[in-house]
Image: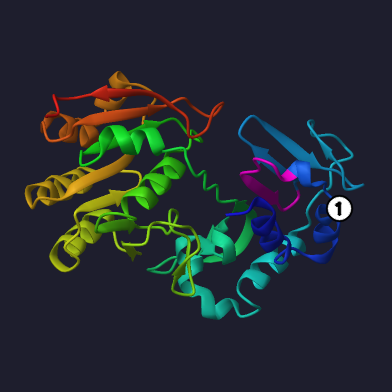
Amino acid sequence: MNDSTSYKTVLSYLPEKIRGLMSALHERELSCLTEIRMRAGGPVYMVYPDRIRFLQKDGSLSEKYTEEAYLVGTGAVKETVERLCHFSVHSCKKQLEEGYFMLENAVRVGISGVYSSAERPVLYEFASLNFRIPRCVKGCADELFAETFDQNIIICGSVNSGKTTVLRELCRLTGSCRKTALIDERNEVAGLFGGEPQNDIGAMTDLIVNLSRAEGIMSAVRTLSPEVIFCDEISSTEDSEAILNGIGCGVRFAVTAHGENYNDLMKRKDIAFLVNSGLFDCIAFLEGASAPSEIREIKRLRNVH
């Protein structure tokens, strides 16, 4: 996914004043950009792996938040949400329940604010927006693919370490040569829009979106006959149990989990459950936010014949 193409997608949903200021940014300012955030009464700021920069009133960027920062009005946030809803807020109840929109070119927008007190709460006052720029880094999983082919693997790292990016690339490589299923609960990996993945996830990869990981895994095993299943952000024992059931059906798994090192990882009941099962072959630890998508270590959990 081209950074400038995704950036243009973001601009198309912004109010005219902010769009005008941000349109003037130099191409170099878009390199490695991961998020564009705006908050009512607060600044517009750009997030990179190693820094944050604030949009100024003159359209430049500053490393410090000063009086010259451009401040976002409440009306601008509301207008942006209306643009995301194509000026039909009532038709976007599902997105406002879940708190995010998926746009063209795999751009994902998170929304914060006030939820209603209904049985199924819906956002009705909007405080801030977070436009996430997708990062497909071809080649970042080549070594992992070669060293862990046909193995069960956990990809681990801290926040912003590139776990999803590595998983996506590994899925693309695997899905180009094996029957693969991607369980993408919140549509963060594939970026499905209009029925088509906006990110390359492999020629033979089947996609399941908007089901819980546990439900998606069992659905894939029953109906899609995958050889490999990919899941992002394992977070419950229910997820782990579904994974082990899938392995019992002869499926290989590649999953991600939050954790900087082995000791931290084993403090989590859901991940310890997977590791202690003896069915996972290795854990790949990523370098961290300072070097997104780079692999620090591949820890073997059992001998592979």
Q: Is residue 205 left or right of residue 112?
A: left
Q: Is residue 233 left or right of residue 239?
A: right
Give the image location of residue 148, x and y in percent.
26, 35
Q: Is residue 18 left or right of residue 179?
A: right
Give the image location of residue 261, x and y in percent.
35, 21
Dot 1 alpha-carbon crowd within 10 angstroms: few under 14, some 14 to 19, many 20 or more: few
Give the image location of residue 270, x and y in percent.
22, 37
Q: Nearer the viewer, residue 280 or 86?
A: 280
Q: Which residue position is annotated with label 1?
A: 24
Instruction: Please name the residue shown 59% across and 76% down the image.
Output: 89
Instruction: Please name the residue shown 36% across and 32% down the image.
Output: 156
Q: Residue furthest right?
A: 58
Q: Which residues are magenta?
A: 30-41
Q: Is residue 85 above or below residue 228?
A: below
Q: Is residue 87 rendered magenta in the image? A: no
Q: Is residue 23 left or right of residue 151?
A: right
Task: Give the secondary structure at mark 1.
Answer: loop
Instruction: Please name the residue shown 89% across and 40% down the image.
Output: 68
